[in-house]
């Protein structure tokens, strides 16, 4: 095993994924408490003490809930954009009695940087946060794309999704379930907006049109517990990818909210 992807959990209650190469281990988002992150890593057969860094997509709580305690406990750096750090600190300052992150590294979308032997390319995504990004990680010839929390698929996101060996991407809601579901109208409008969340239908449109079908694994992430069902999301993706993806050689995987999924290894 040279490169592996372990989704510790994905959804509105918390998001966190571990990207591992032979020499480097990165936590992508820290949406669970420190204790819960450690527990999930243990369940997945990973040692929390082996993490080298945390990278953050944006400042919403389901992506940063545990970042302060994790970084402090493990004494590792946290990478985020300047805008994300500003917004995180504005909301977290009182909670942590004015104590900031001890090691913060800021980056800008569109400019790659290195963490150990992993090349990290952040790119802008459309979401209602200060400066949200997706990531493409490259290590040992393997490319991994992680892009969740986006309202639609702009051209730059389509570009970075191409050529990935593993693509983890949002399939948040079924349009009909959302429209007839329990959310207040204002929340429905937010989810449906261009800075909201990606529907099964919008993802299927990308899969059936612009997507190159290169991924050996497509991970459907950030599924809504109220406005989606795993079988609906998977069926929509499979139908859209039918002519582009060899479903014998390639796999569609569902990220779970309440437990880690089996590591994807290359």
Image: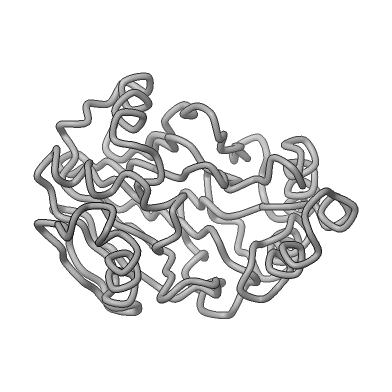
Q: Quadrant of the C terminus?
A: top left
- Classify residue 254 as left or right of residue 18: right
Nearest the camera: 131 or 27? 131
Q: Position of residue 204 (x, y in %)?
A: 75, 59
Q: Residue 182: x percent and y percent?
A: 82, 49
Residue 102 figure quarter: bottom left
Residue at point 44%, 53% (across, down): 61
Q: Which quadrant would the N terminus be assigned to in this image?
A: top left
Residue at 25% in and 51% down: 54
Residue 218 visible? The answer is no
**Residue 191 in view, yes or no:** yes
Q: Is residue 168 above or below residue 43?
A: below
Task: Tell me: residue 141, above or below residue 58.
Answer: above
Residue located 55% across and 61% down the image:
149
Is 33 above or below relative to 15? Answer: above
Tell whether 174 sits left or right of 34: right
Q: Nearer the viewer, residue 59 or 243?
A: 59
């Amino acid at each position: 095993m040279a490169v592996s992807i372990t989704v510790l959990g994905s959804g509105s209650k918390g998001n966190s994924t571990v990207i591992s190469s032979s020499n480097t281990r990165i936590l992508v988002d820290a949406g669970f408490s420190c204790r819960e992150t450690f527990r999930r890593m243990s369940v997945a057969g990973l040692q929390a003490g082996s993490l080298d860094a945390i990278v953050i997509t944006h400042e919403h709580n389901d992506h940063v809930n545990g970042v302060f305690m994790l970084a402090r406990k493990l004494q590792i750096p946290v990478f985020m954009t300047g805008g994300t750090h500003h917004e995180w600190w504005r909301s977290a300052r009182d909670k942590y009695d004015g104590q900031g992150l001890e090691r913060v590294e800021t980056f800008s979308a569109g400019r790659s940087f290195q963490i150990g032997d992993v090349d990290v390319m952040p790119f802008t995504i459309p979401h209602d946060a200060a400066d949200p990004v997706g990531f493409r990680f490259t290590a040992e010839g393997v490319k991994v794309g992680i892009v969740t929390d986006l309202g639609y698929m702009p051209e730059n996101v389509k570009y970075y999704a191409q050529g990935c060996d593993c693509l983890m991407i949002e399939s948040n809601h079924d349009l009909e379930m959302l429209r007839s579901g329990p959310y207040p109208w204002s929340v429905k409008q937010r989810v449906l907006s261009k800075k909201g969340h990606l529907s099964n239908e919008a993802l299927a449109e990308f899969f059936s049109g612009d997507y190159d079908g290169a991924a050996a694994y497509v991970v459907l992430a950030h599924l809504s517990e109220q406005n989606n069902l795993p079988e609906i999301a998977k069926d929509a993706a499979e139908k859209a990818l039918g002519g582009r993806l060899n479903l014998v050689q390639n796999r569609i995987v569902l990220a779970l909210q309440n437990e880690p999924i089996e590591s994807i290894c290359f």
